[in-house]
Amino acid sequence: ALGENKPDKKMDDALRHLFLDTFIDELKWIEEGSESPIERLFCTAVLLVGKTRGHDLLCFTPIVDDQIEAYKQNLRNWLTSVEDLEHMLQAQGGKPNELKRFIEHLVEQGQMDKEEAQELLHYRMYGNLGYKEAFHVSQQPRLPSMLRVGKHGIRPDLLVWVPNDPSFNLIVECDGYSYHGDKDSFTRDRKRDRFLKQSGYEVLRFSGSEINDDPLTVGVEFVDFLAKQRGLKSTNQPS
């Protein structure tokens, strides 16, 4: 457990604060990114259940204004920059928990501008908290423009992806009856699901009624699904 090893207590405390800050940010991003109460309830339940499994199983992203593929590539570029700095620090005999001070030193020496430093300090959590392999959840993502059904581009409720695994793409839909309960919507949804699957996306759908009736159970089911993709034990199995 964090904090048990006294020499590392200062580092553990820093990680706790970092984890707490990111958790609060994720709650805010869910509030800002949800287009319906059902989506907000589902995402909140998933975040709460996911964090009980471990801080690095899943995380929510801010609202993505760019095309999601551009956002993902930008994130990977920043992660590469962080890794390069980590290697540079290690080559000089530094330790991973000294990365923040190392970045500040580069700014003081005029070798890095402040804006770049702020971005790097933000993305360093991926190294400290292990988020490189975490499932990233983006709400209302703008998928590539070639993904269209008829004249309409596809913009799902959620896209789940992994920075270190470009092949993993999971779409999640939270279907309220008022928008998905008639015959035409039922047929359209299934056409869309088939098209997405042919384009390399898996699709999971949860009904609004099951989310409203028992959001935590739905959250556990979804988190268990993700955990099994990582080969982890589900939450309903005895330890």
Image (spheres, rainbow, N blue to C red):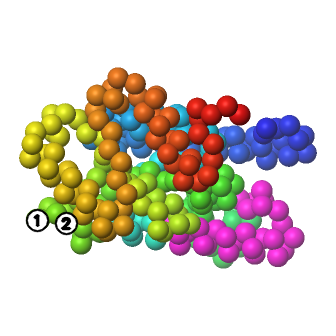
| Residue in the foreground of this view, choosing between 215 and 198 | 198
Q: Which span is picked out in magenta? A: 74-101
Q: Based on the picture, tell me whether residue 96 belongs to the magenta stretch.
A: yes
**Residue position for label 1:** 151
Q: Residue at x 63, y 47 (%)?
A: 232
- Res. 84 in view: yes
Question: Please, what secondary structure does the residue beneath circle 1 have?
Answer: loop
List x then y, in percent, for residue 149: 16, 63
Neighbor class of circle 2 (other Cα within 10 Å; few <14, some 14-19, many 20+) is some
Classified by dominant secondary structure, the portion drawn in magenta counts as: helix
Residue 121 vertical position relative to residue 158 in the rendered view, above or below: below
Give the quadrant of residue 94. bottom right
Q: Residue at x 39, y 70 (%)?
A: 70
Q: Residue at x 90, y 40 (%)?
A: 6
| Residue in the foreground of this view, choosing between 164 and 229 | 229
**Residue position for label 2:** 148
Q: Residue at x 19, y 33 (%)?
A: 177
In-image side of 172 versus 145 (left or right)? right
Give the quadrant of residue 230. bottom right
Q: Where's the C terminus, which quadrant?
A: top right
